[in-house]
Image (cartoon, coloured by chain):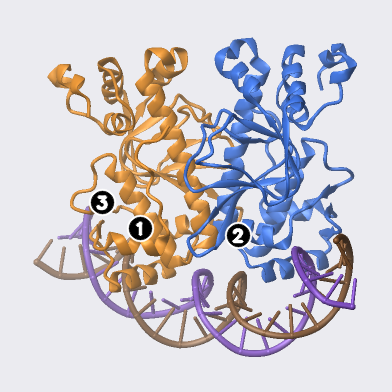
Chain colours: A blue, B orange, C purple, D brown
Amino acid sequence: MNGQSALLPRKYTQSNAAVQRMSALAELSTDEMLILHNLSRQTRSYLPREELWNESKPSSPRIILSGWACRQRTLGDGRRQIVSFMLPGDPCHGLERPTIPGTCTVVALTAVVLADAKTLETAVNVNPSLYPGLTRAVRLLSIYESLSLQDQVVRLGRQTAYERMVHLLLELHERLDTVDMVINNVFPMPLTQEVLADALGLSIVHVNRTLQQIRRDGILEVRGGSVTILDMEVMLALSDFTPVSGNFE
Amino acid sequence: MNGQSALLPRKYTQSNAAVQRMSALAELSTDEMLILHNLSRQTRSYLPREELWNESKPSSPRIILSGWACRQRTLGDGRRQIVSFMLPGDPCHGLERPTIPGTCTVVALTAVVLADAKTLETAVNVNPSLYPGLTRAVRLLSIYESLSLQDQVVRLGRQTAYERMVHLLLELHERLDTVDMVINNVFPMPLTQEVLADALGLSIVHVNRTLQQIRRDGILEVRGGSVTILDMEVMLALSDFTPVSGNFE
DNA sequence: CGGTCCATTGAGCTTAGTCAAAGAGCGTGG
DNA sequence: CCACGCTCTTTGACTAAGCTCAATGGACCG
C-alpha cells in the first residue's frame, strides 16, 4: 500500500488489522505506520460473549485486532437488537466518535483481541497536522460507521428478510475485503443464526428458512463457518446494495 | 440559562433555536452566544418537500432555525426509509460529523429556515480552546445524533408497530422540549401519516390503525397537527424508552 | 454416552401489508 | 358562495410475510 513501509525494521512489517484498515484509507508515513504497528504491543484477549465495553465502564479507546464483536441493546423483556458489527481493524469504542452512552454494550461474538489505542487517539487529537494520514483515516472510519448504520436502518425498515440477509452479507463482504479476509469470494462467517436474527430483526427460524432459500437460488453458499459469493451481480441487484465509492473526501 | 446573556445588546436577546439548543447543552460565554445569535443573519428558506442537501451538493454546514426535515434514503423500486428527523436547532449537515456521502438526501418536511454555520464551524475547528462551550455543545449534538440513530435501529428491528410509534413520539417530545416547543405536554406534529410510516417502517394504513389504538387507550391524543401526552408513565413503560440522562460527559 | 449448542422442520397463528373506496379538510377560482 | 381538485385520513376485506411453539437431527466435547 505504501512504499515507505519497506523502510521499516523487519520486526514491524508483519502487519496487523489496524495497519491494513488504515493504510487502505489513507497514505501513511513511516511514523504513522509505526504507531499502528505498536498497537499490537498492548493487547487484551476476550472470550466469546464477553462484554468488551459498556457505558458505565469508561476506558481509553480500543481497536479490534482480531475477532468479531457487536454493539447491541437489550429491551426490558429480553429482546435483543444488534446495532452494528465490529470487525478486525474497526475501532471498538471511543476513537474520534465520542464515547456513546445510552443502553448499548459491546460484546464479543468470537474470541477477540483488543489493542489500546490511546497513543493513536493522542496523535490524532493533540497534533493532527503532524499525522495527516492517521487523521484522515480516523475521520473516514467514522464516516464508514455512519454509513453502515444508515444501511442498517434501511434494511430493518424497508427490506424483506431475503433482501436484508443478502444486503448484510454484501456489507460484511465489503468490509472484510478491506482487511484482506476475502479470498476468491469466500469469507469467514462466525455468526450463528441467532446472531443474524438479532441483527436483522428476524426470528431464528425465519433466518434459517431465508438462508435456505438463498442457497437454493444459487447466489451464495453458507457452510462450515464461511460464505461463498456465487453471483455478485444478482446479489447487488436484488438487495439494492450500494458499494462505498472507493475514495472520497 | 446563562447570566451573561443579560449583557448582550437587546437586539441579540431574541434567541433562535440554535441558541436554545446549544445553551441547554453547555455554558456559553457572551462571545459564543453572539456567534449563535448571528446565525440568524444569513439564512435561506425552503418549501416543504424541497431538498436541503444531497451528497453531490457539498456546501458549508447548516443549522435548522425553524421547521422540520429528515434524512432519507430511497430504494430502487421507490420504497423510502426515513433515517432520522431533524428539528429546529439541529445541525442539518456537515457540522462536526463529517459530510456523509452515500445515497442519503435531506428533505424539508415543513417550511424550513436554514442558517449558514460556517462561522460556528470555524470557531469550533480552528481554535476549540477559545470556544469551550460551543465545542462541547457541538460534540454533544453529535452524541445525541448517534443515540437517536441507535434508537431508530432498535425500534425498527425489535419493536411492534405500537411500541415504535410511542417510542418515536417520546423521542420527539424530548427533543422538542430542549428547544421549548413543548407546552403542557403538548407539542406540534407536522408529520403526515405517510411520513410516520416511512420513518417507522410501516404502511400508511397500519400507522393510521396504530394511532387509533393508542388514542383509544387514552395515553395520548393526536389531533390538528399536535400531540398531547396524557400518560407519560405508561408510555415510558410500554415502549422501553430511555430518556437521555440530562448531562453527561 | 450423555450433554450442550446449533441447525432444521412442521403446523398453526398474528401482525402487518395490499387493494380499493369513501370521507374530511382546505385552498382556489369561477 | 359553492364546486372542484388536491392532499391526507379513515374504513373494510382479504392476503401474506414472518412469528411461535414444539420437536428432531447433527456436531462436538468431556
> Which residue position is annotated with label 2?
A159
Specify whether B215 is left or right of B244: left
Residue B92, visible in the rendered structure: no
Mark 2 secondary-structure assignment = loop
Position in image of residue A226 (x %, y %) = 84, 53
Residue A162, located in which quarter of the rendered image?
Answer: bottom right
Position in image of residue B218 (x %, y %) = 26, 70
Position in image of residue A11 (x %, y %) = 87, 19
In-front residue for pair B131/B98: B131
Q: Residue at x 77, y 41 (%)?
A: A176
**Label 2 to label 3, Cα distance in Å?**
30 Å
Mark 1 secondary-structure assignment = loop
Q: Label 1 amino acid?
A: Thr
> Which residue position is annotated with label 1?
B192
Q: Residues within 10 Å of mark 2 (few under 14, many from 20)?
A: many
Specify whether B45 is left or right of D2: right
Q: Label 3 amino acid?
A: Pro
Position in image of residue A134 (x %, y %) = 66, 20
Q: Residues within 10 Å of mark 1 (few under 14, many from 20)?
A: few
Same chain for labels 2 and 1? Say yes or no: no
Q: Residue at x 62, y 23 (%)?
A: A118
> Which residue position is annotated with label 3?
B188
Q: Residue at x 31, y 27 (%)?
A: B43
In-front residue for pair C21/A204: A204
Q: Residue at x 61, y 38 (%)?
A: A145
In the image, is residue A47 above or below residue B54?
Answer: below
Q: Residues within 10 Å of mark 3 (few under 14, many from 20)?
A: some
Same chain for labels 3 and 1? Say yes or no: yes
Mark 3 secondary-structure assignment = strand
